[in-house]
Amino acid sequence: MTTERQKMESGAWYSCLDSELEALRMTALNAVHAHNHLPPSDRRALSPPLRALFADPGNACLIEAPFHCSYGRNIHLGTEVYINSGCVILDSAAVHIGDGTMIGPGAQILCADHHRDPVKRRAGIEIAHPVHIGADVWIGAGAIIMPGVTVGNRVIVGAGAVVTHDVPEGVTVVGVPARAI
């Protein structure tokens, strides 16, 4: 028997309205709540609740509060990653963020893609696509990285950009949808 979690992890269509997935999301919510309510002096390094939650917490990383993620267990950080306040990572698939990457306030990294059929969408049917962000990337405030996107090393994503396609190494993208400049 294939569980909804197994379907999600394999990249197949799955129902997010599943008790096992709900339990995993609750674990993440509790860790995020603990992180977000720590005194600022206790968040100067990656907080213990997030360090325990993430698949790979990286070294010398800092995540400002508030922060939100769906599962946490699919987040892989390189070294010296900085995530500013209000960032959301919906990690129903793997999210890899490379060394030295900086993510601006209010940025969103999204893996879940809902079904186009409204009946299936209402039933919670979705699919998860991994997101890969290279090293030394700067993602501006309010930018959105869509499911399945790969952002190359040394990319700059302008504030408010919506990245819907892969971005090659060393390129600057801006706008909705994001385009190279």
Image (tube, grey):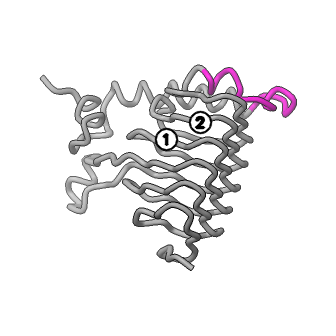
Q: Amino acid at mark 2?
A: Gly
- Name the residue carrying label 1: 96
Q: Is residue 136 magenta?
A: no
- x and y, in percent, of residue 139 in the image: 63, 59
Q: Is residue 117 left or right of residue 126?
A: left
Residue drawn at x 20%, y 61% is 117
Q: Gap between marks 2 and 1, in whole Å? A: 8 Å
Disc number for residue 31: none
- Name the residue carrying label 2: 78
- x and y, in percent, of residue 174 in the image: 58, 74
Residue drawn at x 61%, y 26% is 31
Q: Is residue 43 magenta?
A: yes
**In which quarter of the view is residue 38 placed?**
top right
Q: Amino acid at mark 1?
A: His
Which span of residues is magenta-colored? 37-51
Residue furthest to the right in view is: 41
Answer whether labels 2 and 1 touch (C-beta < 8 Å). yes
Q: Is residue 41 left or right of residue 123?
A: right
Image vertical order of residue 162 relative to residue 95, above or below = below
Q: Label 1: few (<14), some or many (≥20) within 10 Å?
A: many
Image vertical order of residue 78 relative to residue 150, above or below = above
- x and y, in percent, of residue 59 in the image: 67, 28
For mark 2, give the secondary structure.
loop
